[in-house]
Amino acid sequence: MKARLGLGSLESRIYMIFTLMIFVAVFIMQLVSFRFTINALRSSTLENNRTLLGQLVTQIDSYISGMEQISQAVQDDPEIIEYMLNGANSGSPSYLSIQQRLGNYIKARNDISDIIIIGRDGLVITADPDSNLNPWTSVSEKDWYLEAMDAGGQTVVSSSYVQNLVEGRYSWVVSLSREILSVDKNESLGVMLVDLKFNRIKELCQSLVVGRKGYNFIIDSDRNYIFHPTQQLVYSNIRSEPIDSIYALLKNTEDEFFFADKKYFMIETSDITGWFVVSVTHESDIVTDWRYVQISYSLLGLILFLIVGLATNRISSGITKPVRKLQDIMKSVDTGEFRLVGSIRATDEIKELAREYDTMVGHIRNLMEANTREQELKRKSDLKALQAQINPHFLYNTLDSIIWMGEMGQNKEVVLMTSALSKLFRISISKGREIIKITDEIAHVESYLTIQKMRYKDKFEYSIDIDPDLYTHTILKITLQPLVENAIYHGIKEVDHKGLIQITGEELDGNIKLEVVDNGKGMTTEELEELNQNLDTSSNSHQLSQQGMGVRNVHERIQLYFGKEYGLSYISTPGSGTRITVLIPSETLEA
Amino acid sequence: MKNWYLILLSLVAAFILFIALSILYEQKTPEELDLSEPIQIVMKSIEGQPMDFWDVVTQGIDEAAREFGVEVKITGPRYEKEINRQINIMDAVIDERPPIIILAANDYKRLVGSVEKADALGIPVVTMDSGIQSDIPVSFIATDNIDAGNKAGDEMKRLILLNSRKSIAIVSHIKETATAIDREAGVREALLDENVIGTWFCDVEQEKAYLITLELLKDESLGGVVALNEVAALGVARAIDEMDAEGKVFVVGFDSAVRELSYLEEGIIKATVVQRPYNMGYITIKTAVDYLKGNKIETFIDTGSILITRENMFQREYQELLFPVSN
């Protein structure tokens, strides 16, 4: 578990990489959708604003054209024309009745501030009977008067301004003025002025706005502001509008709007007035609630991360679990155990890996077995070489004895010894066989004993008492001879009394027990212990005498052939001789 | 719970995503001041005539509040002379712990205590139109009345050259008010070489100004009167109108009441110095918002004044200043 949490583990790496990828992906997705959303929102908002702006202009136009109709009606009023033509002459309508007529036009519309007719000779008629003319102002200096006189009967729409024609009243108006012509159009009778309450336009501009910070304003072609919600700030340069860009946009037919100072500007021209109505939308009103978008995307991210987490967990445990099992099994190699994986639940790659591993382990096992066998064979051949080495001194001494006996003319003895020697060698070789019958082994050791007895001139006697049932059983060749040799050189030779070597053999619990007993010098407990130890530990051979080596070789060979439970054992008492026991399995030679 | 660390990691990743998106949107969303309490504005008086000075200041305030997305709450005594009432209102406003207080002080000295109290509680104060005798307010937004007085004085100096009568009187509205003191100083500075015969106080009563002027008109050498506010100007103009003295005594006034503008058209008042109340209201809120945002602000902002004569009163750029469009 610990290891899995570590940064180096497969699972955490997969998770990290996936999470990072999702993170980047979601973030990029966000950026893209952010742009997309902004553009979509912007175009839909601006579309909306365009519609609103269109409505605004339409309303202004229809408002102005409504006024124009009134002015036309006044223009066409025969009584008014009559009055203006003839003045207050008898028979023509009175000043008051004209004033009343004008008043009737106003009553119908509460958005008309005043209708004023300026006749020739400074005659001024206002619609309001209670108002007095402002004595301090001069009508003929007014822009609307001059422009109307120039327009030749066409309606002139003024900019917004403060009308001060009536005493004590200063009202914001937009004026429609036109020259009144006589019926035959030849004679100028004066100028008629229809003042529209500017508030009406202001209200229109202020009602059709978008968002909290949106607003509309109107400029004319002379760069004057007809209306601006914060006109004073504009005039005192605290605020400014990008007038140049606005006029540039008017000339540019491609773009619908432009963006400046976090605001979107759109323009519509009012055909009747020639005004340019500008709609301003603040950026912050287009993009309202980012927090919502942000939270929803984060939630999406969270869900994706969780899915990635669980998926990673599934994927990596599909990989790591079998890998871990594989790893555990592979670890068994350390202990020398070669376990196989066998069938495993995993992906194909891991299965393949496991199969390859099993094959490999199989090969290794075979190789190791072969190797062990080889080693054994090698050791066996080594031992063979060893056992084949009959002590050369023994051969020289025997031959010397034969020569000496020949010289002495003891022909009978020469024949006996030579035939014994011959037998000894024949059995030693045994056509290279390793296993021989016990009878052969007996013959071998008897030959040896015969020679030695002759050489040592009856220094010892011997007896061989082996159960004849065992004769056909098998034994490693040259098992008894080294033991006898040992008994002679380390037992009998050392004592003065006549020695006796007894060789016995019997079957015991399915094994064959052979014993070589001498009545020689024997061994102390320490010597015995050392000897027994030497048998079992592969040791440095030079510590041992030739005979010692021979005995140990016998022991090793037996164990090598038959197993650890077989071999030699010593029993000895100092002064009374030694008993070597050979234990081998009871086997018969196969045909 | 084998996969607890996955959930934890996912949460952490989602949180980091949230933060990253926050940063992204932060750049896109315009910086807005988010106040839990409205900005409190204590006016000199709240019972004004439509379209008078304070009404227009309020329009400017409302426009700025809309533009900067802040909430404002306007209070004040009914009349300008109710100084104790304004002090009480200040106390009540301080108790509401607003983010900032905007004060148009009715007294130069007596409101200092209230401002100190606000300061002790960590509430910044901005003064407008009329300041107080203290360094505590973070900014003072007003017409530079000395400069305005200069303009009136310069105009009077120009006019008196055309008049054979050379004495000049000053009719002030009230003693011990910063606006009156500054305007008078400005006027006197400009008329240093002229014969200023004295300053009379009308105590913000038109009738008293009228009576003062009637008295002054008995002096045959009187050639000019500078009236330091709207009330004084109306009183002076009325007296001159009634006595038919417009050719003999030239009046330069302050402010732009409708009646005053009529007098201007008639020629009884030769010129009037007007402030920019709309701009004052707007700039005051803008300054307060800037301060709350931690931006650097000026300790004094002059919202400016303009000399209006019959010749320029209907000029496009001054029309709305003089004749605010009613709502």
Image (tube, coloured by chain):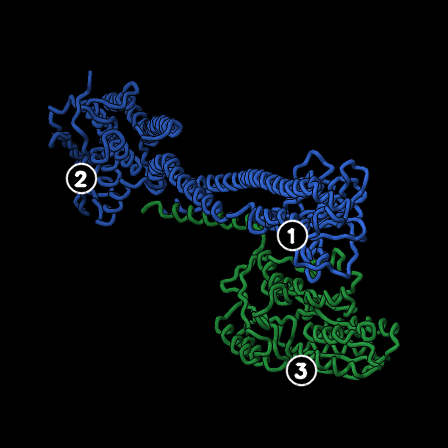
Chain colours: A blue, B green
Circle 3 crowding by C-alpha within 10 Å: few under 14, some 14–19, many from 20:
few
Residue nearest the observer in this picture, A551 or A174: A174
Which residue is under mark 3? Answer: B176
Q: Residue furthest top?
A: A591
Which residue is under mark 1? Answer: A113
Relative to A500, is A230 on the left or the right?
Answer: right
* Residue B226 marker: none
Relative to A361, is B44 on the left or the right?
Answer: right
Residue nearest the observer in this picture, A287 or A326: A287
Task: Tell me if label 1 and label 3 are in contact, CB under 8 Å.
Answer: no
Task: Tell me if label 1 and label 2 are in contact, CB under 8 Å.
Answer: no
Image location (x, y in percent) of residue A509: 11, 32
Relative to A322, is A410 on the left or the right?
Answer: left
Q: Is residue A415 visible?
A: yes
Image location (x, y in percent) of residue B233: 72, 73
Q: Residue furthest front?
A: A90
Circle 2 crowding by C-alpha within 10 Å: few under 14, some 14–19, many from 20:
many
Image mark 2: chain: A
What is the count of numbered marks? 3
Image location (x, y in percent) of residue A221: 75, 44
Image mark 1: chain: A
Residue at x 32% of width, y 33% of height = A338
Whether callout 1 and callout 3 share a subunit is answered: no
**Image quarter (top left, top right, bottom left or bottom right) of the C terminus of chain A:** top left
* Amino acid of disc 1: Ser
Residue at x 78% of width, y 50% of height = A143
Q: Is residue B306 above or below residue A186?
A: below
Q: How much space separates mark 2 and mark 3, taking CA atoms?
A: 145 Å
| Front disc: 2 or 3 | 3
Q: How much space separates mark 1 and mark 2, taking CA atoms?
A: 153 Å
* Residue A579 marker: 2
Circle 1 crowding by C-alpha within 10 Å: few under 14, some 14–19, many from 20:
many
